[in-house]
Amino acid sequence: MPLLAPTLEEEATMRELLVVFQEGFDEANITVTVNGKQVHRDLAVSTNPLLGIASEVSVELPAKGAQVGVEVTNRGLKAITKVSGRPKSVLVSIEDGRLLMREGTGREAVL
């Protein structure tokens, strides 16, 4: 049976976002949420000092914007950012004891 391409309606309802965990992660327990719903969880994530990357994950977003949240549960850190339009990636790092999130270009993927 041939594979069917997604319909325009299906393409319009969901899109992918790459969440890239960069500097500052050391045995971090990470939870990623989209609009308050948990979509990914990872344990013991640490930044590779040579790459400056700890991990990356691709999550699905609804077409009409979303709030993407990241929580480092074993360090009590949490951040939420609103994404709209067609964001390619969100970059997450821990700097000066704070969890920072910013929109990326989508070209940051290494792993």
Image (tube, rainbow, N blue to C red):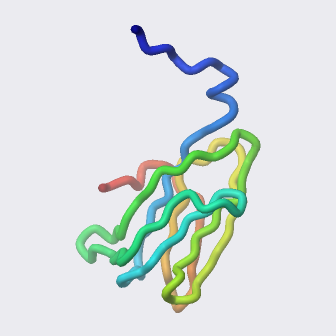
Position of residue 29 in the picture relative to residue 12 (left or right) = left
Q: Quadrant of the C terminus?
A: bottom left
Image spot of residue 91 (x, y percent):
51, 64
For the point 52% across and 91% down, the residue is: 96
| The image quarter in which residue 6 lies | top right
Left or right: 95, with 2 as reference point = right
The residue lying furthest to the left in this view is 50
Image quadrant of residue 12? top right
In the rendered view, tell whether residue 62 sits above or below residue 31.
Answer: above
At 35% from the left and 70% from the top, the residue drawn is: 54
Whether residue 35 is situated above or below residue 3 in the rendered picture: below
To which quarter of the image does residue 1 belong? top left
Residue 10 spot, x, y in % from top left: 64, 26
Residue 48 or residue 12, whichever sits in front: 12
Extreme residue in the front direction: 1
Observer-nearest of 51 and 71: 71
Instruction: Report the residue that reaches farthest toward the top.
Output: 1
